[in-house]
Amino acid sequence: MIYEKKSFKTHCKDYLIITIACFFYALAISQFLDPNDIAPGGVSGLSMVINRISGIETGTLIMLINLPILGLGLYKFGFRFLVSTIYATVVSSLMTNFLARYAPVTKDPLLACLIGSALVSMALGFIFKCGATTGGTDIIVKVLRLSFPHLKTGRLFMICDMAVVILSAFVFENTDSALYAAIGVVVMGVVFDIVLYGADGAKLIYIISEDWKSISTRILIELDVGLTFLEGEGAYSNAKKRVIMCVVRKQISPQIEEIVREEDPAAFMIISSAAEIYGEGYKNIFSEKI
């Protein structure tokens, strides 16, 4: 097995982007959402709720709650998968505590909800583009999908987020804050998709490689992406070929490229844009067209 590692320059660029994104993530939590009692789901929202009960700083709680989640991710996906995620989690948590010392930018709940949610989703989008996460529910959802592949990823995220939103209504004793948080969850979903996918939402990828088994295994386990095997035959050699075909969200495409480079630098790969995709995780063929 041949590994082609990222260059030092590429690593530095990725971690610079992650650091900047972590700053804006922390800014959104500490200066917009947290001071206005808006818990937009996930670990950050849960940390806000527990902060009101325990008095522990929100950033510290984000890190503490993520520790067992990161341990679970380490067990399931390996250390290499979690290095950048651990970095993003620690940096965003420390920055959140630091920025919380300053007065909030606004006390208008609607402005805080819209701007804070947009900043969080933009930051997460760029962190995801660099192959990292901030831990939390995305790791939990990945683990659940390993055991229960029939459950839809989007539905799992929605359940986790809305559970935190409902809990915040009781802890904050403010229905308005919970409603703003629900709006924030929607805003985050829309902006997150725009940052990651843009107008071109998916990529169609074909991979032809002698190491198809190791490539497909890593894609299935590390990225939670569905694959289809096609039977091919070389026109000149008449050799039988196993072709991997998959359709993925735009931001996952570079991660698949990296896996292929690591497993088989000589692999033949075709990546094209997919304008419309129907099926689980994409559009519903019965309801999207009018």
Image: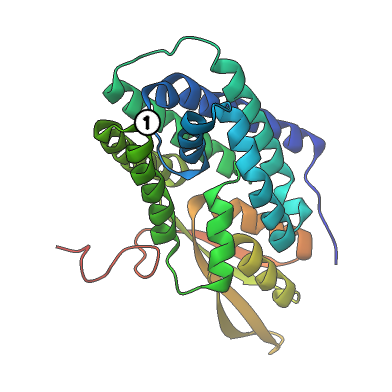
Q: Up-down: is 54 above or below 130?
A: above
**In the picture, which quadrant includes the C terminus?**
bottom left
Label 1 crowd bin: few (<14), some (14–19), many (20+), radius 10 Å:
many
Is residue 97 or residue 150 the one in the foreground? 97
Provide residue 245's location: percent of width, then percent of height.
Answer: 55, 72
Q: Point out the residue furthest to the front here.
A: 53
Q: Point out the residue furthest to the left here.
A: 290
Q: Up-down: is 67 above or below 114?
A: below
Q: Point out the residue furthest to the top here.
A: 103
Q: Which residue is mark 1?
A: 38
**In the picture, which quadrant includes the N terminus?**
bottom right
Q: Is 259 on the left-hand or right-hand side of 172? A: right
Provide residue 211's location: percent of width, then percent of height.
Answer: 75, 74
Q: Is 114 on the left-hand or right-hand side of 145? A: left
Is residue 130 visible to the viewer in this orientation of the structure? no
- Numbered disc total: 1
The residue located at (36%, 32%) in the rendering is 172
* Helix, strand or loop under label 1: loop
Q: Up-down: is 16 above or below 1?
A: above
Disc 1 marks a residue whose amino acid type is Ile
Is residue 16 or residue 235 the one in the foreground? 16
Q: Is 277 on the left-hand or right-hand side of 234? A: left
The residue located at (51%, 30%) in the rendering is 51
Q: Point out the residue furthest to the right here.
A: 1
Is residue 166 visible to the viewer in this orientation of the structure? yes
Provide residue 54's location: percent of width, then percent of height.
Answer: 54, 31
- Quadrant assignment, res 178: top left
What scheme was used to colour the molecule?
Answer: rainbow
Provide residue 69's location: percent of width, then percent of height.
Answer: 64, 51
